[in-house]
Image (tube, rainbow, N blue to C red):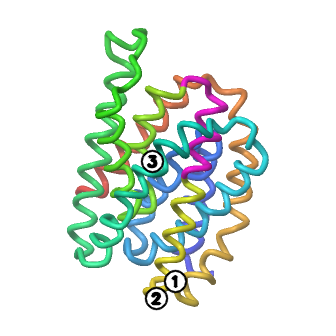
Amino acid sequence: MDWRLALLSVIILLAYMVGATTGFGGAMIAVALAIHLYSVEFLVPILVILNLAISIYIVARHHDGIESGKLFRFMLPLAALGLPIGILIFSVAKTNTLNLVLGVFIVCFSLFELAILLGPWKDREREPMSALQSSFWLFLGGVMHGMYASGGPLVVYYASRNIGEKRAFRSTLSALWLMLNTGLLIVYLCIGKVTADTVWASAILLPSLAAGIALGELLHDRLPERGFRILVFAVLLLAGISVFL
């Protein structure tokens, strides 16, 4: 096995352990770290396939936690509206531009979330978003998902304000990722972004994904949610800084 692929396997295990624990963050952490090994164009189709696998697992096992009303009436239509724009940007933008946008976005978002989690207002109850605010974040989340197969941070920000229970949070987000990534995979197949190398790399990474899911399931009920979210955003911040530099 190529040393880069071996290192990518470790990144996938750790990233998707986070994804299985929280319902978000796996693909963003993976692309932020793995971008030092492979190009965004090579990584994103692989992450789409891996995201589908983890989403299918969580939805199949925890489907009774899905908030169907929010998902089908609000979250999916707005995110799906932004998805084609993100796909178009991903198809035409240069690698350096995509890397810069990704690095700046991850740094800004991580700092914002850490400020909320650690700042003087950490214990305040956060009000649900208005319909206009929700529409803005979900649409932009769809655009980001089309670009990097991970609109997680933007959609998660919406979900953190509008879906209170931890189990419903994870299950509903996983159901959204399942449908968005199915659409992404169909598009990538049609435009030739999924190649034999993509499928082969995805197959090699599946054992790491499975290990990450197993560890994430163990951690989901045992770790304090706030402490784990602080760790996630701290790792994302360091990854974002490294991508930006």
Report the residue that reaches farthest toward the right: 61
Residue type for callout 3: Gly
Where is residue 25 shown, x and y percent of the image? 50, 47
For the residues bearing labels 2 and 1, Cβ distance under 8 angstroms: yes
Q: In the picture provided, is 44 more to the left or to the right than 205?
A: left
Q: Which residue is mark 2?
A: 192
Looking at this view, is 31 or 160 the one in front? 160
For the residues bearing labels 3 and 2, Cβ distance under 8 angstroms: no
Write down the region rendered in magenta: 164-176
Q: Which residue is mark 1?
A: 189
Residue type for callout 1: Leu
Q: In the picture provided, is 77 more to the left or to the right than 166?
A: left
Say which element carries label 1: helix
Q: Earlier in the sequence, mark 3 or mark 2?
A: 3
Residue type for callout 2: Gly
Mark 1 surroundings: few (<14), some (14-19) or many (≥20) residues within 10 A: few
Q: Is residue 32 above or below residue 192?
A: above
Q: Which mark is residue 152?
A: 3
Q: In the picture provided, is 188 more to the left or to the right than 88?
A: right
Q: Is residue 201 above or below residue 172?
A: below
Where is residue 57 shown, x and y percent of the image? 73, 54
Q: Which mark is residue 141?
A: none
Say which element carries label 3: helix
Front of the two marks 3 and 1:
1
For the residues bearing labels 3 and 1, Cβ distance under 8 angstroms: no
* Residue drawn at 31 percent across, 39 percent down: 109
